[in-house]
Image: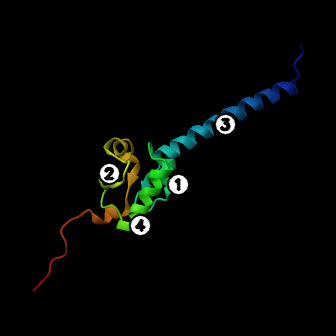
Amino acid sequence: MIVTVQTRRLQTLERVRAFLAGLLALVSLAAVAGTRIDFNSASAREYAQGLDGVGEARAQATVEHRRAHGDFASVGALVEIDGIGEVTLGKNRERLTASSEQRLRPVGPGPRCSA
């Protein structure tokens, strides 16, 4: 069987395309894995897609709890949500952040008042 130059080029292009598709998939997974979720502003969809062990129902319950009670004071406060315990929190702790958590954290001595 004689393989033409054109056929070899097509085979090579197909291999390159498959390699690039795989590479893109890996980069996408790495980006998702490295994404931190702000639990005081995330949508239910962001919770469900970005956290292990959190499905649509728990994600929606988290958003509803936040609306009813205000922002969470810390990542650990998520255990207040029915179905989110220490195990689920432990699996996801590194993926979670909160903009309000940063505001609550003391950064140094406050301004001094002069009387």
Dividing the image into 4 quarters, which one contains the N terminus?
Answer: top right
Which amino acid, by three-letter code, is at mark 2? Val
In terms of secondary structure, where does tag 2 sit? helix
Residue in the foreground of this view, choosing between 95 and 113? 95
Marks 4/3 in contact by CB < 8 Å: the verdict is no
Inter-mark Cα distance, 4 to 2: 16 Å
Percent position of residue 52, x then y: 45, 43
In terms of secondary structure, where does tag 4 sit? helix
**Residue carrying label 3:** 20
Residue in the foreground of this view, choosing between 23 and 47? 47
Inter-mark Cα distance, 3 to 2: 41 Å
Which label's residue is closer to the chain start, 3 or 1? 3
Please report the residue visible at 89 percent of the width from the left and 22 percent of the height from the top.
4
Q: Which mark is residue 67?
A: 4
Location of residue 102 (image quadrant): bottom left
Percent position of residue 49, x then y: 52, 48
Percent position of residue 69, x then y: 35, 66
Please report the residue visible at 87 percent of the width from the left and 19 percent of the height from the top.
3
Percent position of residue 28, x then y: 57, 43
In the picture as drawn, the residue positioned furthest to the top comes out as 1
**Residue carrying label 2:** 79
